[in-house]
Amino acid sequence: MKKTLAWMLALAPSLGFAPSASAADHLTLQLKWVTQAQFAGYYVAQAKGFYKAEGLDVTIKPGGPDINPSQVIAAGGADVIVDWMPDALAAREKGVPLVNIAQIFEKSGMELTCRKDSGITSPEDFKGKTIGVWFAGNQYPFLAWMGKLGYTTSGADPEVKVLKQGFNVDPLLQKQAACISTMSYNEYWQLIEAGMKPDQLTVFKYQDEGVAMLEDGLYTTDAELANPQKDAELAKFVKASIEGWNYAAAHQAEAVKIVMSYDTAGVLNEAHQVKMMASVAKLLNDGKDQTGYLDPAAYQRTVDVLMEDKTDPVITKRPEGAYTHKVYDAALAIKN
């Protein structure tokens, strides 16, 4: 019997199976958007072997305009997702038990970018104007801001007309809207690359307007966290992802090359990705905390903004159990 078992173990690799103790743990990460430098840290962790070093086999699934990460994880299509906190908290209130386990972006990159020739110089000038807004969960920061300003955005005669914006900058270039939604690391640069000059634009950063909300964080579900084995795998995943992000920020040119190598569709412009990587690196920690740490004060600010509009709040009650430091603390405690 012992001889037979030894013979089977010796043949295991050639037969396509191996003892479970040596098998890598598989995790699937669903991104919020398509492959680009916004997610450089995860691709770097994959390419540099940081996940493999933790005994993980990670599948990175790009997102897109028709992919909602919270819906993907709710359907069992991912173990962890990248999402914005407004969308995650709204989904949790609706029954998808999302939990933030690490906060990669400490600052908000979201902006409203306006044409100067529209006459907009301050938020008070938004009234009577058409503004491009992303939906699919990305509208919550905008709606909360308009609620804070006291502007209506729906009904027969809204004070601010909302144009459902596609994921491009055409409405501003074609003067279909006075302002559009942009990210500091992406669409703003698309406008510049399309020929607009910085002095032709007025940029309102959500971070500076008191309505900044937490963006790219890592989320899993209550059920995943209740599983001790999965909980341990997630800690390893967070550790390796943080290593990936720290490496990407310190080696931006290499990080861009890595991201480009995962562009199977061949649609990325490397010069644009270089700008994106530099801008994304500025959204990480500011030196006070380590990458991935969720500041409870920033979490609370996000909740407050989402609830500020009393007539139509994004969430109606303060969430319970919507974040945990347990996974992050366990990740930092891992010694290789």
Image (cartoon, rainbow, N blue to C red):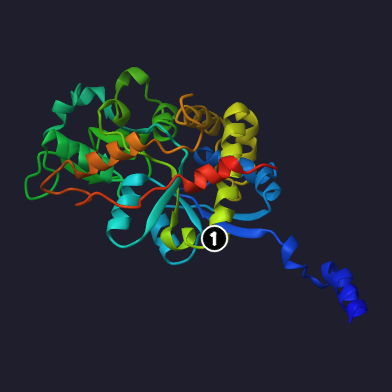
How many neighbours does mark 1 have within 10 angstroms: few (below 14), some (14-19), or many (20 or more)? few
Residue receiving disc 1 = 228
Number of numbered markers: 1
Q: Residue at x 52, y 42 (%)?
A: 329
Q: Quadrant of the N terminus?
A: bottom right
In this orientation, which residue lies closer to the viewer: 61 or 174? 61
Q: Amino acid at mark 1?
A: Pro
- In the image shown, does 140 or 271 lie closer to the viewer? 140
**Could you tell me residue 25's position as x and y percent?**
64, 59
Instruction: Say above or below: 33 vs 211.
Output: below
Which residue is rendered at x = 14% and y = 27% of the image? 125
Classify residue 312 as left or right of residue 205.
left
Q: Residue furthest bottom?
A: 1
Whether residue 65 is situated above or below residue 331 in the rendered picture: below
Residue 60 makes an appearance in the image: no
Give the image location of residue 267, x and y in percent: 55, 44
Query: In the depicted view, which residue is nearer to us: 144 or 195?
Result: 144
Front-most of residues 65 and 279:
279
Q: Is residue 167 visible?
A: yes
Q: Position of residue 335 (x, y in %)?
A: 67, 42
Viewport quadrant of the C terminus:
top right
Residue drawn at point x = 44 percent, y = 36 percent = 105
Q: Check the image and name the residue furthest to the top.
A: 199
Q: Residue sitting at 33 percent across and 39 percent down?
A: 299
Q: Quadrant of residue 170?
A: top left
- Across and down, in percent, residue 222 comes to 42, 59
Label 1 residue SS: helix
Q: Would you say 35 lies left or right of 156 here?
A: right
Q: Residue furthest left?
A: 157
Left or right of 117 in this view: 159: left
* Residue 189 quadrant: top left
